[in-house]
Image: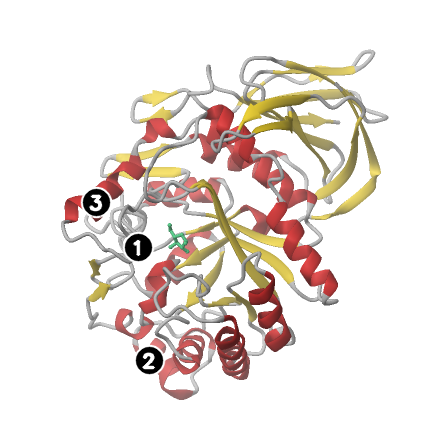
Amino acid sequence: MKVFINPNREIGKRNPMIYGHFIEHFHRQIYGGVYDPGNPLSDEAGLRTDVLEAMRKIKVPVLRWPGGCFVSSYHWKDAVGKERIPLFDKAWRVEDPNTFGTDEYLDMCRKLGCEPYICTNAGTGTPEEMSDWVEYCNLENEGQYAKQRIANGHEKPYAVKYWSIGNENYGSWEIGAKSAGEWGRLVNESAKMIKHVDPTTELTAAALTDLDWNINLLKHCSDRLDWISIHEYWDGIHQTNDYADYEQVMAYTYDIDHSIREVRGLLEAMGLEKKIKIAFDEWNLRGWYHPNMHTVQMAVDKKDYLYPRDKNDDNTKYTMADAVFTACFLNACNRNCDIVGMANFAPVVNTRGCIYTDQNGIVLRSTYHVFDLYVNYLGDIVLDLWNETPRFLSVRHKNGEKLDVEAVDLLATKFSDREGIALAAVNKDASQGCELTVEVGEAARYQVHTISGSSTESYNDVGHDEVMIQSTEWQTITDALKVVLPPHSINVISIE
Ligand code: AHR
């Protein structure tokens, strides 16, 4: 396979927030995940220092919180100050002690050095409750909520820039679901009040690739919105936990950016593509396993709806399939960097996250290493690239359909702050390596950083480390730059 890269043909500069993350009050993401007071591994605020360290290593640029479905019946005022009011979380049918609230979350973001991104309750909440939250976080000292923040020991405003109005309020499963018409009006009134509190905030609202919903939203609110939020989980195993196998996951990479393309088309049709960016603020190959939820008939016994959630934490299930898919999606976000400004892996800790915790430590799952590779080795300027001899794989989708997908997914980048090219090359083939010849003009040497595992089923777990980044020494380029991409591998080729 031969590819041509022209360092002068720039597609655009990617926003670092496309490597963002999401954390929800669901199962062990917060309590027992990042927030574990009393654990010797936690700091004075109860935050797991090993988790924070791992998140800093992948330079988490933005962290969306507190949900997700959780947020649609969450009231932030119960979770600030000395007296916390325990919540029966109607979204997930558990008690939330509310000991982790706004101040704890913003302390975590400060320690991570990341942007906070708060999703508000547009289910049972009101425009006033949302804008009160912005008062609490962003006003110097005016009004009761800023004064409450100061009384709670936080003198300085937090300057939270990114706010979402609602989660998936289009969905019948969502508490306080709305019709398209209701949604446009609610978002408009909420955005108005939030901007009246702090005009420097950047706002998004829940959307999806549904024309009516988005046209209504954009018709009513485009002048007040800066982003539009979309979500996608490809292997929808929320009720069944029947994981797609490696070949079926490769089928999911077919047309992986269809949601981006559809929303881009709508924004362009409405002349909004220069004003509103896409926040792909929940995405993961695997849907979260929470059986007998989001259904009309709710289970009664905890063994039917609560205890099964522990099955999300089977580390053996997060293999090279998840890593290869994650790399392909991040490539798609980079290629669409002119309109995708943020993407949030859902979630970052436990459930389907890239970091698993137990009370003794953490496991860095296969997907973690993809973020490490992309954040720390790829450039921030996306370049055009031409693949002269693309190869295709014929794979069977979970629905039985045969699909031809490109065998190798490529992304060329360079750096705005230094010389050099970095080429991401993902080989989806489960059994065949691929020899790649790279034409890039003047170059003297190259180095290859590879994640491949020993098989498609390789995974990491406690005391079991099969998946990691392995780097070659720098190699001098003599006649041509040729690299063999191992089967089921994600590679970044650094070229100078
Ligand atoms: O399965 C988890 C849920 O997926 C999130 O809470 C929600 O935002 C999405 O539907």
Instruction: Tell me if mark 3 has few (under 14), some (14-19) or many (20+) residues whose alpha carbon lies within 10 angstroms of its own.
Output: some
Callout count: 3
Q: Look at mark 3 in the image and give the residue it sits on.
A: 39
- Left or right of 89 on screen, residue 59: right
Q: Secondary structure at mark 2?
A: helix
* N-term-proximal mark, 3 vs 2: 3
Q: Residue 287, can we see it?
A: yes
- Residue drawn at point x = 50 percent, y = 70 percent: 159
**Residue closest to the eye, 416 or 66:** 66
- Residue drawn at point x = 47 percent, y = 71 percent: 179
Furthest residue to the bottom?
143
Q: Look at mark 2 in the image and give the residue it sits on.
A: 148
**Residue closest to the eye, 424 or 157:** 424
- Residue drawn at point x = 40 percent, y = 42 percent: 53
Q: Position of residue 136 (x, y in %)?
A: 40, 77
Q: Secondary structure at mark 1?
A: loop
* Label 3, label 1: how far apart the Cα atoms are: 36 Å
Image depth: mark 1 or mark 2 in front: 1
Q: Look at mark 1 in the image and give the residue it sits on.
A: 295
Furthest residue to the left?
301
* N-term-proximal mark, 1 vs 2: 2
Q: Is mark 2 within 8 Å of ligand 1?
A: no
> What is the three-letter code of the residue carrying label 2?
Gln
